[in-house]
Amino acid sequence: MLTYLVRRLAILILSLLIAAVVLFVLLRLLPGDPANALLSVGADAAQIEKAREQVGSNLPLWQQFLRFAGSLARFDLGTSFVSGKPVIEEIAARLTVTVPLALMGFLLSILIAVPLGILSAVKADRWYGGLISTVSQFGIAIPVFWVGILLVTIFAVTFRLFPSGGFPRRGWQNEGQVLYALALPVLTIGLVMGASLLRYVRSATQDVLGSDYLRTARALGASFPEALIRHGIRNGAVPIVSILGIELSTTLLGAVVIERVFALPGLGSMLLLAIEQRDYPNVQGVLFISTLLVLLIGFAADLTQRLIDPRLRERAVGGSA
């Protein structure tokens, strides 16, 4: 297992390096000079050259990349062209919105999908089992921004139970206000992600219901709930864990839509604003941190699968041998 962990960490670091190279190249292929973000209309040649020296765009590409790689090695993402603040500080502040939003929505989706998915599989021959499956298909087809707008219309505009958007200026100093502000965004993510996840839980449960080990457990005298809990859930959880990792990564990357609908100052909003302002360090920093989070989530999901299923650990040991 230790050999496997070392190999996976090496793959993670290599993937991060490749992502950094791709990110650097793609941003340099964009039209225009990054120094333009520092210049006002009518800047003369001296001002343009000074701005280019400041951002390093006057250097050859290989020197720019070495500077970029050296900064990443120190976990220095540069300084924003617009605000003049370190990019890492701005990202850290935005993550206090995006990460809780994604995690709470993720947990809510699990609370929705797991019991309903198991119920729809176990009771597939009943009308409510089919109804749950049908409703989940509608949930998958509906765009997330439309669900957000619908919830705002019902709970914020019509009944005035929750705010339609925004985030407390004092942030997490008042946790009650933050949770109140995030209620509708979290519900939006939970419903949309839960509908998608429910389908996989239902499919995994159906595979478990038709398995030999479940029938053997029943033949040995275990009741159906006992056999399903003791033997079925653990085996059914293995494929679901990888789906959970993908769903969580998608939520983090797709937070820009929810943050736009509910006017939340998260990582996605920061990326959109940086693109509009041509703030290259912020764009570069947000994309790099997003890539890092996705790789870490994939690593955690892969590790969790092997902790749940000993067969995967044995396969990993056999493959390394």
Image (cartoon, rainbow, N blue to C red):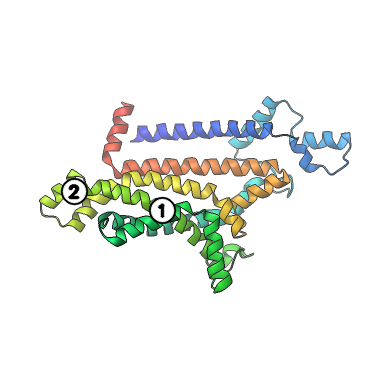
Q: Residues within 10 Å of mark 1 (few under 14, many from 20)?
A: some
Q: Secondary structure at mark 1?
A: helix
Which residue is identified by label 1? 137
Q: Is residue 157 visible?
A: yes
- Find residue 41 and report its horizontal and vertical position in percent: 86, 43
Mark 2 vs mark 1, CA separation in Å: 28 Å
Residue 299, above or below 167? above
Q: Quadrant of residue 40?
A: top right
Q: Residues within 10 Å of mark 2 (few under 14, many from 20)?
A: many
Q: Secondary structure at mark 2?
A: helix
Inspect the image, locate mark 1, and give the three-letter code of the amino acid beneath it.
Answer: Gln
For image coordinates 59% across by 42% down, the residue present is 287
Q: Is residue 23 left or right of residue 221?
A: right
Q: Is residue 158 left or right of residue 78?
A: left
For image coordinates 27% across by 49% down, the residue present is 206
Mark with earlier residue (2, 1): 1
- Find residue 122 and report its horizontal and vertical position in percent: 25, 56
- Find residue 56 and report its horizontal and vertical position in percent: 74, 33
Which residue is identified by label 2? 214
Residue 255, above or below 178? above
Q: Is residue 124 left or right of residue 29?
A: left
Inspect the image, locate mark 2, and give the three-letter code of the amino acid beneath it.
Answer: Leu
In front: label 2 or label 1: 1
Residue 215, above or below 190? above
